Image (spheres, grey):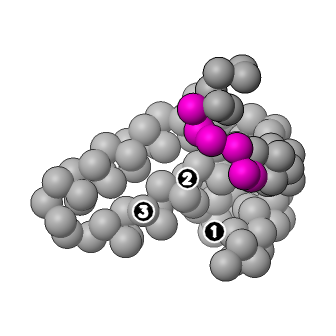
Amino acid sequence: MSDTIEKLVKTIKSRKENDVKSSYTSFLLSKGSDYCLNKLREELRELEDAMKNKKNTIHESADVIYHLLVTLESTGINFNDIMKELNNREGTSGFEEKRNR
């Protein structure tokens, strides 16, 4: 399952230098992290509406994941570092993890 996410992360990175007129990802990244973050917020609101209406939740969930990954790339956050952090948390209660911050 994570192969799909890893492939998407690589695709997002590779699109960074593409023409903004032919690549939506390149367009988003060219606008900067604030723009990407605002777009992510918009997508989260759309997901919230979809969940409330029980309609298009799969589509909107995929949009949120894509826009999260684009936003991470726009801010220079390495996805592998996030995966390492998640691996470190494996087997740890969410309550315990919060207390340890």
The answer to which image quadrant residue 25 occupies is: bottom right
Q: Which of 30 and 100 is in front in this view?
A: 100
Q: What residue type is labelled 1?
A: Ser
Q: Which of 90 and 73 is in front in this view?
A: 90
SS class of the residue under badge 1? Answer: loop
Question: Label 3, on which residue?
Answer: 61
Q: How far apart are marks 1 and 3 (CA)?
A: 24 Å
The quadrant the N terminus occupies is bottom right
Q: Nearer the viewer, mark 2 or mark 1?
A: 2
The magenta span reads 90-95
- Up the image or down, 11 lies above or below 16; here it is below
Question: Which of the two labelled residues, at mark 2 and mark 1, occupies the earlier sequence position?
Answer: 1
Q: Does the magenta stretch include residue 54?
A: no
Question: Which of the two labelled residues, at mark 1 and mark 3, occupies the earlier sequence position?
Answer: 1
| Marks 1 and 3 close (CB-CB < 8 Å) | no
Q: Nearer the viewer, mark 1 or mark 3?
A: 3
- Residue 87: percent from the left, percent from the top? 80, 53
Label annotation for residue 58? none
Residue 53 visible (yes or no): yes
